[in-house]
Amino acid sequence: MRALSLRPDRPGSLAVTDVPDPEPAEGELLVEGLAVGVCGTDREIIAGEYGTAPPGRDRLVLGHESLGRVRSAPDGSGFASGDLVVGVVRRPDPEPCGACAHGQFDMCRNGRYTERGIKELDGYASEAWRVPAEYAVRLDPALSEVGVLLEPTSVVAKAWEQVDLVGGRSWFEPERVLVTGAGPIGMLAAMIGAQRGLDVHVLDVVTDGPKPDLVRRLGATYHHDGVAEAVRDSEPDVVIEATGVSSVIFEAMGATNHYGVVCLTGVSSAGRSLRVDLGALNREIVLENDAVVGSVNANQRHYRAAADALTMADQDWLAGLITRRVPLAEFEKAFQPEPDDIKVVLTL
């Protein structure tokens, strides 16, 4: 069968290759691959910045944002042929840390976890794949066109859970949220904020294209003139930061209401300098009982919450997030950014 694979240690090695058909082990589903989403993590692996092939192999099958349809399932697994499914990305380490041992492998504390399409496990960018039933999530059949958004939605479902846990230190009933960045993570974070009944504000840099319209269709407010302007009339109780841009991060950390919670989901590039008044920022965070927390990855609980959020969402709005669909044979086009891109999907 065909799969999109590469040598993680060799930039420019990405290619469609022939790989053996998957043979499901006991307790595993055999799944027909329908689509994979493309994200910044994939681009960094392609560039040779990180990524690890399975032990004893040179090449890694790419793809961690999956969507597939079950071909066969073991008896008693809870799945059946024809089910629409997504595979969980991360697996706990073989000798689990405390978090992994308690099913919270998204919070692994020793770094020995593995990840499909990223670290030591083949990804989902193939015409078929196998997955243990406990690491598969069933989707509503109505999500057949947009279910590939589940993995990034699981990331923001976890981010919102982290906000709730941190806010739960005391009485916490947030009213306003500022989402910085209108890429897939930011848009999906805004969607969940709207589902929670919050006053949602989204900040990005573009002034036209699909992003402003999609934000307005959520009933949210779109901003493009920077953090200070976005919070001028109403300080947010929550900030979901999805840009990874250092200047935006520091401004957002100092822009919240009292007892504000900032959840960082964007990964910053190293090596960039920024002059900030860290003393003033520290003073504000301490005196206002603010909190800043980082969040990445997700476990099964977050995938299930994400599946519920996608089912509740307007399907036409979700479809608007997928701005390009590229067939596997033309995979190079999927990794060449275009101005109006939000989410690019490879069809398998």
Image: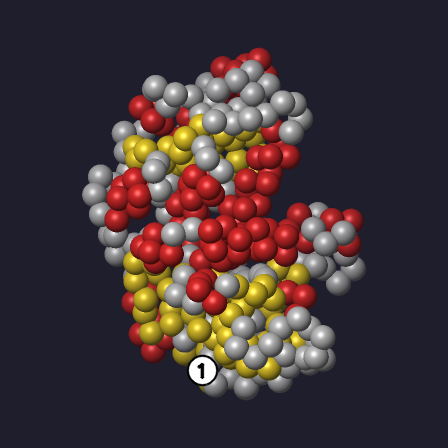
In the rendered image of this protein, does residue 150 appear above or below residue 280?
A: below
The quadrant the C terminus occupies is bottom left
* Coordinates of residue 321 in the picture (x, y in percent): 34, 54
Q: Residue at x 46, y 35 (%)?
A: 197
- SS for tag 1? strand
In the rendered image of this protein, does residue 51 appear above or below residue 174?
A: below
User: Is 261 on the left or on the right of 145, as rendered?
Assistant: right
Q: Is residue 55 visible?
A: no
Give residue 119's quadrant in the image: bottom right
User: Is 74 on the left or on the right of 89, as rendered?
Assistant: right
User: Is 321 on the left or on the right of 10, as rendered?
Assistant: left
In the rendered image of this protein, does residue 53 appear above or below residue 158?
A: below
* Coordinates of residue 144 in the picture (x, y in percent): 43, 67
* Coordinates of residue 18 in the picture (x, y in percent): 47, 85
Give residue 330's quadrant in the image: bottom left
Give residue 143's quadrant in the image: bottom left
Model colouring: secondary structure
Q: Residue at x 49, y 38 (%)?
A: 196
In the rendered image of this protein, does residue 37 appear above or below residue 222?
A: below
Q: Amino acid type of disc 1? A: Arg
User: What is the crowding at mark 1: few (fewer than 14 residues within 10 Å), some, or many (at least 20)?
Assistant: some
**Residue beneath disc 1:** 2
Q: Is residue 138 visible?
A: yes
* Coordinates of residue 69 in the picture (x, y in percent): 51, 75
Q: Residue at x 51, y 46 (%)?
A: 156
**Residue that protrudes farthest toward the left in the picture:** 208
Q: Nearer the viewer, residue 296 or 244?
A: 296
Q: Nearer the viewer, residue 326 or 97?
A: 326
